[in-house]
Image: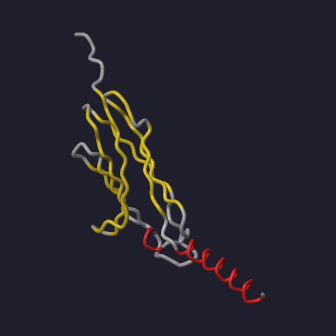
Amino acid sequence: MIAVVLAAVLATAAVYATDKDAKPSISVRASPAFAFAPARIVFRADLRGGPDDYEAYYCPGVEWEWGDGTTSEAFQDCEPYEAGKSQIKRRYVGEHTFQQAGRFRVVFKLKRNSKVIVAANVTVEVRPGVREPF
């Protein structure tokens, strides 16, 4: 009986250790996901789960590929990483104006130098806008 209880406690502890050690997952959303040109769309990338001090995601470069042939990049200047103290950023926001109609696959990337460490994407649809009379 004691062995069964001990095994259950150890299995539960292993699940918590695994969740704590798992890398955060990433998702990207667009608001709105459908619009008329010219369309200003706001994108939000969220990191969920994993530890707050996940080293690989600490102080990354950020790249947005807008799907229309343009990109945006940003880099941070951060303190050196310290386990248990350094915090990863959990939310990134970008916005882009699509001048032309089309279906655009927007890709969000976290990078270390030129190496992509994680990426996610979302698709937006931009319809032709109403033309002003001359």
Q: Quadrant of residue 56?
A: bottom left
> In this picture, is 37 found above or below 47?
above
Query: Residue 103: percent from the left, percent from the top?
Result: 28, 38
Query: Residue 131: percent from the left, percent from the top?
Result: 26, 17
Describe the colour scheme in one phrase: secondary structure
How many numbered tags mark residues here?
Answer: 0
**61 displayed left or right of 2:** left
Quadrant where the image shows the C terminus: top left
Identify the residue shown where x is 50% and y is 66%: 88
> In this picture, is 27 found above or below 58?
above
Q: Quadrant of residue 74?
A: bottom left
> In this picture, is 6 found above or below 16?
below
Identify the residue shown where x is 47% and y is 74%: 55
**117 displayed left or right of 90:** left
Residue sitting farthest toward the right:
1
Residue sitting farthest toward the bottom:
3
Residue sitting farthest toward the top:
134
Q: Quadrant of residue 60?
A: bottom left
Query: Residue 133: percent from the left, percent from the top?
Result: 25, 10
**126 displayed left or right of 83:** left
In the foreground, 8 or 29: 8
**46 displayed left or right of 34:** right
In the foreground, 87 or 102: 102
Identify the residue shown where x is 44% and y is 46%: 29
Query: Residue 130: percent from the left, percent from the top?
Result: 30, 18
Identify the residue shown where x is 70% and y is 81%: 9
Quadrant where the image shows the N terminus: bottom right
